[in-house]
Every structure is written in C-alpha cells, then in structure tokens.
Amino acid sequence: MAFLGDVLMWFTDHANWSGENGIPQRLAEHVQISAESVLIAAVVALPLGVALGHFGRFGDLAINISNVGRALPSIAIIIIAFQIFGLGDTPIVICLVALAIPPMVTNSYVALREVDPDIKEAARGMGFRGLAQLLRVELPLVVPLVMAGIRTSAVQVVATATLAALIGGGGFGRYVFDGLALRDYTTLFAGAVLVAALAMATELSLSGLERLLVPRGIRVLRAPASARAATFKTA
Amino acid sequence: MGKVFLEVVDPWVNWDWVSRHIPLFEDALLQHVRLTVVAVVVGFLLSLPLGVAAYRWRLFRNPILAVFGIFYTIPSVALFAFLVPYTGLSETTAEVGLIGYTVLILVRNVLVGLESVPPDVIDAADGMGYRPVARLLRIEIPLALPAIFAGIRIATVTTIGLVTITAIIGLGGAGQLIYQGLILNFHTPLVVGTALSIALAFIADGALLVAQRLSVPWARTA
Amino acid sequence: MKRNSDLARRFGVLVALVVVAAACGSTGGGGTNSKGTLTVAGFNFPESSILAEIYGQALAHDGYTVTYKLLLGTREVVAPAIQAGQVDLYPGYAATDLEYYNRGAGEASGDVAATAEKLNTRLAPLSLVALTPSAAVDQNAFAVTKDTATKYSLTKLSDLAPVASKLTLGAGPECPKRPFCLPGLEQTYSLHFKAFKALDTDGPATRAAFKNGTIDVGLVFSSDGDLNSLGLVVLQDDKHLENADNVVPIVRQAAASDEVKSVLNAIDAKLTTADLVTMNSQVSIQHQDADAVAAAWLQQHNFTG
C-alpha cells in the first residue's frame, strides 16, 4: 500500500504538472495523435463500411477485415513506419489509423446489413430512393452499432498510442517507457493509470455522443452492454 | 514522405541473412506459440466458471464486467513492465498479462453466448425435468458454443499480437526479431518478425475456424 | 452426448500440444561435462551484446554452459537482476557502474585503478565483484551534426557554453539523473540547454532526432562505429567530465571462481578501444551478428583457436 501512496504523491507533485514532461503537455500530445488518427480512420472507414453494407457488396472482406486488423502486431507497424518516416508523429498516426479502420468498417457494414428489410421496403414504398433512403432512413437506424465501432477503435487507439514513446514520441507512453527504463515503477504506474483513465473518458464521452445522436424513437434498439464488447485489443 | 532516413542502402529483406538465421526464427516461433497456447488455454479454463457465475448470479455480472472493462484499457506494455519486480523477467510475467487479456475477451463471449440462449429453450428444458447444473452443461453451454468459439478465435489472434509486445521485457517470440530490427536499425529481422507474427495469426485463426465448423456445424458465424 | 465427448477429445489433444510445445521449447540443461551454468546479461545497445558474447563464448569454450540475456535493458534493469541472482555477470563500465552503485556520490575519476578499487568497495556488500578493467574505453560522448559544428564553430564541449540556450539536448531518459550526463554538463561546463528530449540511450530514436533536427546535441558513445557515416562529430571533453569508463566484467561473487576470473581477465587484457569501434561498425553498419563478430575477435586473439 506504500506504493499506492507513492503514486498518489506523484500525482500531487507540482513538478509533474508543468513543463515538457508534465501531465498537461503529455495529455495534449496523447489526445492530439489519438484524435487525429481516429478522425482520419473514420473519414476512410465509415463511408467504406456504409457503402459496402448498403449495396451488400464484399461482405466477407468487410467482416474479415477486423480479423486482419487484430492480426497486425501494432509494435511492428510503428517500428516499420518509423524506419521509413523517421522521427515525428507520422509513423504513429499511420499505425493508429491502420488499427482504427477495421472495427469501423466491420461495424458499419454489419449495421447496414442488419437494417430490417421491411423498413427498407416501407421506405421505398414511401418514395425514398437511393441516397435519400440511405441518409434519412438507414443511417439513423444504424447509429448505435456504428458508434460502437468508433468507440472500439477510439479506445484501442488511445491505449496503443502509448507505444509512440518507443520511437521517441510523446504522450502518456513517455511515463510508461521512461519508468520502465529507469525502473521507476511509480512513474510507470502513473502513466498506465493516465492512459486507462483517458481511454475510459473516451469511451464515456463517445457513449454520451451516441445518446445525443440516436433519435429518441429508436433508442430501444441500442445494443446490450455485454455485446458492445471489448473484442479488439492491439496494445 | 517516404524518405529513408538512414543513407546506408539496406534492402527490406536481405535474403542471405534470412537463410543464415533460420534457427533464430524457429526459436522465436516456438516461444511465440508456447506463450499464446498457454495464455488461451488457461484463459479459457478461467473464463468458463467466471462467465457462468456472471450469467447465473446477477450480483457478479456487473462487477466482473466492470473490472475487466477497466483492465482492457490498461496498455499492455505497462502491465508487463509492472509485473517484472514480482514475477521477474520470465515467461510467467508475460503469461499473467496475456491471460488477463484472454480472460477478458472470453468471459464476455461466454456471457454473450449464454445470454443468447432463447428463453423458450430454457423453459422447455425445465419442463423436461432438467436440474440447473444439467441444464447448464447439456443445453446452455452447447448452445453458447458458437459465441465461445468466436471468443477463442478472437482471443488467440489478439494474444498472438500482444506477445510481440513482450519483447520489451526480453521475450517476444517473433517480437524479438521486430525489437532487434529497431535497436540495430536493421530492416530484415523487423520484416521477418512481422511476417511470422501475421502468418501465425492467420494460420491459428484458420485452424480454429475449421475446429469451430467441425464442432458446431449448426451455427455458421463469421 | 457424442458432440460433447468429441469436444472433450479435441480439448485433450490441445492440452497435449501445449505440453509438447512447452517441453520442446525449454532450453536443455547442462552438458555432461559442464563446469556449471552461467547467465550473461547485456545492456540494450549492440556493443553490450558484443561484449557479453565475447565473455560468454570464451567461458563456453572453457567448459561452462552459458545462457544469454541480451538487450535486457538499462543498468536500472540489469543491476537488480544480478543482485537477485537472475544473471551471473554483465560487461560493465567502471566509472558509470561506480556512480550507479554509490548513488551518484561523485567518486569516479580518470584513474582507472582507483575507480575500480572504489567500485569493488561498493560491490562487496552486494556480493558482487568487479574484475580487472580493460584498456578498452567507452564513455558518454556528446555529438552534433557537422552542420551544427560549422555553424557555431564547435570542437569541444566548452564551445557550447555561449550557444547552449539555443540548443536542444537529446539522450536516454536516465540522462537527467546521471552525473556524467545532464547534471555534469550543467555543473562542469555551465551548459543550460533550451530543452531536453528523452529519446533512447544512443539508439535509433536519437539518430533519427539528429536527422530531422529535433535535437542539436545528442548523447552517443565514444566507441560507436557509425558516427562518421551519419555525419556526426563528437565534441571533445576538454574539462574531463567523463571518467574512466573502462570495460570491466561485474560478476556475482558466487559465480566468480578463479577459473572464471582468469578467463575474463585474459580477455580484458587484450581488448582495446579500437577493437570496440571496429566491432561496433561491423554490427551497426554491416549488420553482422554480435555473436559472429565476437567469435571472430576471440579467434583472432587465440582464445578459441
């Protein structure tokens, strides 16, 4: 328990809240690379998954891309990107984008596929065609599952961004790797706590966002908690 | 973009080096397989009772899910590093961390599987006179098998990826080659290690898919 | 039900596979005529792997069963490991090891013999012993790119004093705590850099940081073989901040038999700084393996003739 006391003291130490290695700076770095990666991945993955699901094409690919994503060793991708691009944010963002894309594609595809055909039929009967049907009928229905995909990606991006410190990057991973190098377990633990806290905050805020986006009428369709699962761990 | 940062001409795969280091790859793969199999098997053995407990007793369900939900957000590097003073620089340290993550994945899948058993089936079983334990073993768990198998596949592929991270504490399996590639600024072991890890993941996933189709042919899940 | 027993059988096969895999993977025990088992550790940079391999292969040639734990980590990882008996020896550096075990008391000097003696005083209560140091030296060195050297006319470290406030220093995370690193630069040379960037200890991140200008001054090792090819120039340590960092084996007293000592001391007697530079460049530039380079050195010097 003395160890937890040390960790508490680490958090209350003024020196750890200022300067280049302070919590605010590292938080900003960590949030920046995570947010950048999730946004870029979303711009690529969501339209792709939605399109594939809407037209019912390449289903096997869309579903198995998550398996592919899981099979990629994140540490290897970061190092390969580092050897190509050198120091900086680029290698980290590339790795995180690659890891964030699969869950978003798979979830978007499955979500669109699961839209009740009766609803699509009714929409057609009401005069909705093509893009209008997609935007005004299907998309509102699929928000829960799509958001679950975004949440899965975002949480793992935040956790995997810890690896940035391996190739000289910043973020909370600095506390973890520097702590490991110096056998300073207090700093290491503090780093882990900060990453976990940020990941949980990400999960909660995206859940909140989902609540705002899901139209009241279909709120009952939200996926049960146990199914919105932690099935994607990359670091 | 795309500028190689070290001027020395270093092909991505130096086949001569590869041919001279086959035993190194064999050792790395063996360690990788060993770490993975132990993590998944032990994780499965632990997650079955935990999943059943969470299913049977409402009281356990939320705490178990909550604890593992938090565990999931801890970066694995930190977990492995943190265990070192307690379990040393050994495979035990890696296994404790890896098993934690496999249990996490499998408990959820056991739970989802059990919860997806239609209530009609349970009623029918009760009507036929099945006692709770018998019902669990002979009706509910077999019906939950597709989800459980899916969980085993996910856990295995995930573990194969996480094993590479244990290179940070002196292990790593194929991750050792990857880490060496970083420290020595050498492309070839990095590429070989990555390829081995990915290949292992696909082979394991394929083999488990076949096992799944053979064991539970009535349910074709993705 | 048949399904369940099928499953059980498959499960049994899986468990059997686990056992087989575990058995196949475990390293064999000592040979029939082994003099004992020794575990050699190395720090997380290539030169340490080379030195560990040299020591280890010589001991193996002498009849010991040797296992290696290379690229293990910084001294903060290796020192506890040897104190806990998880490893038996590692190739240390006299002055830096002294300042580690005396918690930065500032006892090291340029005098190798005196430094080694003080080191042994510090090691004795930990049941460790330092053997005879080698003439080969590998110290901390601070380098800049050729462009930076030209721009500010830098040849020695004291030349940095007027311009340090404009420059960023890069090193491993342990640098701010090591007397031969940041604190030493501040005290001995009055250098106060604009910023410090924690990267790695003379590793790929430091080199990449030089390349894209993230750092201006970086910590390297004086025996690195690739500095020239990277366009880096080492600044001379004119005020002698760095001390006698001669290569010296640190061994657990329980493992330091007379025979082990004589093998290792014989190696140290022949090892030179030039050898270190050559072997380092063979590994870092030509991508030769540390064990092959070590074997070649041992053969050249008739240890494994």
Image: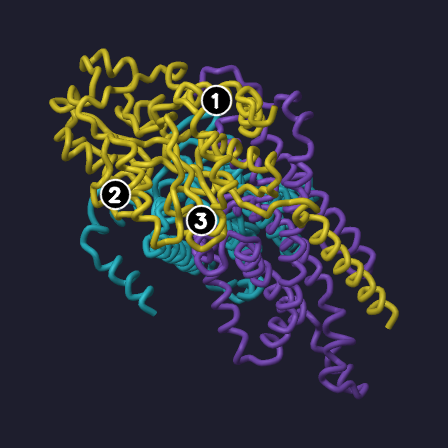
Chain colours: A cyan, B purple, C yellow
Query: Is disc 1 on the same chain as disc 3?
Result: yes
Amino acid on which the number 3 mark rests in the picture? Arg
Residues at discs 3 and 1 in contact (Cβ within 8 Å): no
Query: Residue C271, image x and y in percent?
Result: 44, 25
Label 3 SS? strand
Q: Nearer the viewer, mark 3 or mark 1?
A: 3
* Chain letter of the residue beneath label 2 in the structure image: C
Please give the residue where the numbered disc 3 appears in the rendered image: C252
Please give the residue where the numbered disc 2 appears in the rendered image: C177
Amino acid on which the number 2 mark rests in the picture? Lys
Left or right, residue A168 beside residue B84 = left
Ranked by sequence position, the earlier of labels 1 and 2 is 2
Instruction: Answer yes or no: is residue A52 visible.
Output: yes
Q: Nearer the viewer, residue C215 or B116?
A: C215
Label 1 SS? helix
Amino acid on which the number 1 mark rests in the picture? Met
Q: Which mark is residue B86?
A: none
* Chain letter of the residue beneath label 3 in the structure image: C
Residue visible at 41% across and 22% down? Answer: C272
Please give the residue where the numbered disc 1 appears in the rendered image: C279
Q: Nearer the viewer, mark 1 or mark 2?
A: 1
State the CA–CA distance, disc 2 to disc 3.
26 Å
Q: Quadrant of residue B116?
A: bottom right
Give the mark count: 3
Q: Residue furthest right?
A: C2
Ranked by sequence position, the earlier of labels 2 and 3 is 2
In the picture, which quadrant includes the N terminus of chain A?
bottom left
Residue visible at 71% across and 67% down? Answer: B144
State the CA–CA distance, disc 1 to disc 2.
29 Å
* Chain letter of the residue beneath label 1 in the structure image: C
Query: Residue C241, image x and y in percent?
Result: 21, 30
Q: Residues within 10 Å of mark 1 (few under 14, many from 20)?
A: many
